[in-house]
Image (tube, helix red, strand yellow):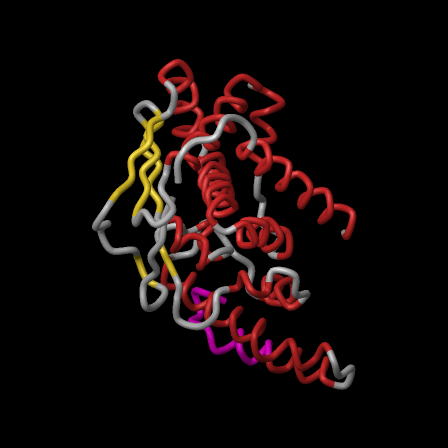
Amino acid sequence: MMLVAGIMLMAGMAAIWWVLAGPRASTAHQTANASLHPISPPVATAVVHAAPGTAGPLAKALDADPALERDAIFLLAAAHTHRCNAADGTALAHLATRAHLPVLKASTVLLNTAPAIAHALYDGVRDAARAIPCGADQVVWQVGTHALAVSLQAYTTGFPETYFHPEVTQSQGPSLLAHADSPCVEVAFATFPAAPDDSWQCAAARHAARSHVITDLCPASLADDGAQQRLALAVHQLKSNLPGVCQ
């Protein structure tokens, strides 16, 4: 398991490095809402366009595969955040591994089956991440007929919840970026896994439960072997308190 996690992390960092490599460009984005809920309409939007020669095939690939779109958003957020705040950009890859998210699986498949389109994705993300000013509010990456819209600040501060639900954000309670290297993240996501088919209400409830495990329940048990049993009971109780459809 540790080997797999290490390989996933290296793959994630390699992809982020890819989109950071190349000629230098501009800057990207910031804003978070008061609690976990759908993002309100953007006030200011930075729009960047993919290169015309590659936009058509890439747009079709993004239209056909929601998982590839999630990879594109993740890479865009990680590359841009790495440029504007390097430590948080690395933390996204660590959190993705700890939370056992299927990050970059779709883009890896694309790299094996259609390498030209995959390279267009990586190059396009790199250019877009650098063209977005640090401090922009909302971002739209226009890839031919496919528009990829996201609040990068909300996505980053709400990650990994926002991997499957980029339309929701959190700022109530600490961002999990500060806990990227904590084994408590794995405990929380093993009990309350992220799922693409969750409603945003369930995503919010699971987020609150995970945050409680990561910041309150789990850390105490790491220093006290006798607390493991109490942690298991507390986590079980926490799970039973979720709405039935979210358990």
In-image side of 104 versus 153 (left or right): right
**Number of numbered discs present?**
0
Quarter of the view holding residue 229: bottom right
Q: Residue at x 30, y 49 (%)?
A: 137
**Where residue 217 sits: x, y (%)?**
60, 79
**Where residue 86 sits: x, y (%)?**
54, 49
In-image side of 111 versus 85 (left or right): right
Q: Residue at x 35, y 36 (%)?
A: 148
Magenta span main SS: helix
**Where residue 108 sits: x, y (%)?**
60, 31
Q: Is residue 35 magenta?
A: no
Q: Is residue 245 magenta?
A: yes
Q: Nearer the viewer, residue 36 or 67?
A: 36
Whether residue 71 is situated above or below residue 220 in the rendered picture:
above
Q: Residue at x 60, y 82 (%)?
A: 234
Q: Residue at x 41, y 65 (%)?
A: 204
Whether residue 121 is situated above or below residue 179 in the rendered picture:
above
* Span highlighted in magenta in the image: 235-247
Q: Which of 219 and 177 is in front in this view?
A: 177
**Where residue 134 sits: x, y (%)?**
38, 46
In-image side of 99 versus 202 (left or right): right
